[in-house]
């Protein structure tokens, strides 16, 4: 007969599952199945050593004892699966450093591919269980989706799954994921076999403590998850009337000519493809002019007017200390734009990566510039609907190859606004601000123009004027002593005297900027002077070396009479 142990309860069974007892053939029985009539099937000796005679014993519901050499790799993974949660993963590999690198590479490869949703590792990972095995050459990943168990191949070689039900063999390509059924086995490229026996359960706690290194990232990920959830919820709960208005051409003042050129080169071809030139050239514009004149504002307005995908980057943003990564960053930006056409890429401070290529240029700058030029040329050849806008404060520092036709050959000067432009910009920035009804707009528009104010200068002056109005009305003082009320802000008005103080602030700021520019120019002149002196010194040393070479005695050719002077005498 069979005896089944369930949570410590002993129940005798026959083949038809009916209880059955037999006459006793063993004496000194201390524990029996029937307290009134001893049975011959169980002897309890030494308080816990169970010996079973004439029967088969099955243990169900209790963990099987670990083998002497410890659990196999398959048993370790099976045990970890029992305690694994949705945001936790298992990595198996030769060492942890390489395993994490393989995981990072796997995520990069998935992002490059179109099948981005197929990897179970594209989620927030709170905990990693790393199982080290010196026999495993390639990293393996295991995850849990509800009750389903999954295997992900993070190597560059094919793995195989032997299906326990169908007895068929399936192969798993690199970066692919497959479900694991009970009793399946996994074969690695090295020939290692991992058996996932559903009837054999290793002890999870022992495995967790002794056979797996735990990397718990819960504290780092939880705040980020909360922040993302709050931000996403605000998108649906925020008051639409208070949402930030998209910047359009009507919000950009003082550059009517530049706006018209942006319409002709970018906006109209995107919105009305039939007007686009079949040559597919001049799809890149260079905005050049003093800082603060609204070049980046114009780029954003162009994207909003054309309803195109917009990517804003700074030239220095693509820099990397790792060899080849900066060029890869450039290609990644363009590839992302190709997937979201029509697209506009705005490169601010492009002089950081597109300076003139000469003998003194560093190798890094040359490689990044060459990558940009290659991508722009490739976009032109492919007929991509991608437009490039670059901004610089110093056009003369750019490499000529960057500004030729077909690249950034379309140059638009964005200078300081004229008096009418200042008035337009001033009106834009005064919207929504509590200016007094008697405020003299004409007077201060002329004052701003007299001081050669740029668009950013005007915006700062308006903000400073509001701050001075708050100070005059005692808002900050009330905040300090705790007497402030929200109604105090409703009474706030910006007056002429507040803007006078803002103009003084503007003048001080411009003086400081002028001093910094002067110092920068001086430093640039000193650097040029030193470079020139170095070149001259090198030339002088070269001339000296040539003169020394010329002054060396030349070897005599032919008969030397002095050698035979003594012989003649």
Image: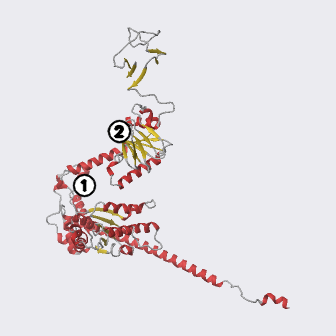
Vertical side of 378 occupied by 124: above or below? above
Quadrant assignment for the C terminus = bottom right
Quadrant of residue 506 within the rendered picture: bottom left
Vertical side of 277 occupied by 153: above or below? above
Quadrant assignment for the N terminus = top left
Mark drawn on residue 353: none
Q: Nearer the viewer, residue 33 or 346?
A: 33
Vertical side of 224 occupied by 312: above or below? below
Quadrant of residue 11 within the rendered picture: top left
Is the residue marked by circle 1 packed among few (<14), some (14-19), or many (20+) residues within 10 Å?
some
Q: Nearer the viewer, residue 405 or 460?
A: 405
Q: On the picture, is 359 further left or further right than 543?
A: left
Q: Position of residue 279 (x, y in %)?
A: 29, 74
Mark drawn on residue 476: 1
Q: Nearer the viewer, residue 287 or 529?
A: 287
Q: CA distance from mark 1 to mark 2?
A: 52 Å
Secondary element at tag 1: helix
Task: Name the residue carrying label 2.
Answer: 85
């Amino acid at each position: 007969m069979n005896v089944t142990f369930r949570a410590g309860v002993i129940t005798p069974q026959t083949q038809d599952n009916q209880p059955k007892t037999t006459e006793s053939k063993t004496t000194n029985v201390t524990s029996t199945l029937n307290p009134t009539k001893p049975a011959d099937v169980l002897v309890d000796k030494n308080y816990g050593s169970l010996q079973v005679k004439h029967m088969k014993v099955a243990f169900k519901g209790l963990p099987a004892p670990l083998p002497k050499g410890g659990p196999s790799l398959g048993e370790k993974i099976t045990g970890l699966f029992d305690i694994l949660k949705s945001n936790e993963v298992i990595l198996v590999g030769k060492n942890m450093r390489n395993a994490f690198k393989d995981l990072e590479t796997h995520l990069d490869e998935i992002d490059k591919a179109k099948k981005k949703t197929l990897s179970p590792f594209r989620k927030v990972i709170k905990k990693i269980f790393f199982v080290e095995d010196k026999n495993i050459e390639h990293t393996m990943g295991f995850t849990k989706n509800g009750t389903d168990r999954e295997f992900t191949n993070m190597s560059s070689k094919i793995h195989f799954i032997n299906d326990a039900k169908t007895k068929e063999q399936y192969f798993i390509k690199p970066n692919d994921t497959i479900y694991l059924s009970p009793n399946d086995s996994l074969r690695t490229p090295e020939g290692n076999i991992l058996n996932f026996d559903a009837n054999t359960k290793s002890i999870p706690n022992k495995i967790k403590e002794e056979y797996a290194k735990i990397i718990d990232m819960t504290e780092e990920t939880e705040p980020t998850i909360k922040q993302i959830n709050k931000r996403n919820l605000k998108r649906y709960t925020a008051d639409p009337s208070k949402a930030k208005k998209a910047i359009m051409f009507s919000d950009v003042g003082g550059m009517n000519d530049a706006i018209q050129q942006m319409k002709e080169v970018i906006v109209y071809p995107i919105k009305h493809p039939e007007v686009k030139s079949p040559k597919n050239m001049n799809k890149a514009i260079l905005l050049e002019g003093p800082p603060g004149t609204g070049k980046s504002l114009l780029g954003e307005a162009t994207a909003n007017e054309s309803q195109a995908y917009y990517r804003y980057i700074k030239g220095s943003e693509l820099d990397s200390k790792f060899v080849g990564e900066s060029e890869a960053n450039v290609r990644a930006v363009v590839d992302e734009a190709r997937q979201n056409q029509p697209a506009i890429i705005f490169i601010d401070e492009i002089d950081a990566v597109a300076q003139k290529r000469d003998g003194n240029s560093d190798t890094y700058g040359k490689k990044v510039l060459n990558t940009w030029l290659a991508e722009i040329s490739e976009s032109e050849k492919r007929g991509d609907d991608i437009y490039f806008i670059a901004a610089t404060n110093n056009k003369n520092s750019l490499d000529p190859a960057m500004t030729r036709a077909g690249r950034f050959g379309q140059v638009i000067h964005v200078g300081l606004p004229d008096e009418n432009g200042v008035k337009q910009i001033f009106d834009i920035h005064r919207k929504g601000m509590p200016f007094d009804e008697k405020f003299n707009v004409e007077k201060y528009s002329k004052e701003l123009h007299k001081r050669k104010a740029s668009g950013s200068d005007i915006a700062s002056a308006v903000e400073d004027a509001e701050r001075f109005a708050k100070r005059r009305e005692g808002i900050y003082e009330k905040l300090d002593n705790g007497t402030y009320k929200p109604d105090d802000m409703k009474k706030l008005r910006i007056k002429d005297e507040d803007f006078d103080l803002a103009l003084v602030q503007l003048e001080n700021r411009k003086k400081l900027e002028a001093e910094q520019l002067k110092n920068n120019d001086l430093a640039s002149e000193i650097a040029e002077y030193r470079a020139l002196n170095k070149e001259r010194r090198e030339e002088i040393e070269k001339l000296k070396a040539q003169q020394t070479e010329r002054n060396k005695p030349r070897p005599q050719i032919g008969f030397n009479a002095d050698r035979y002077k003594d012989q003649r005498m």
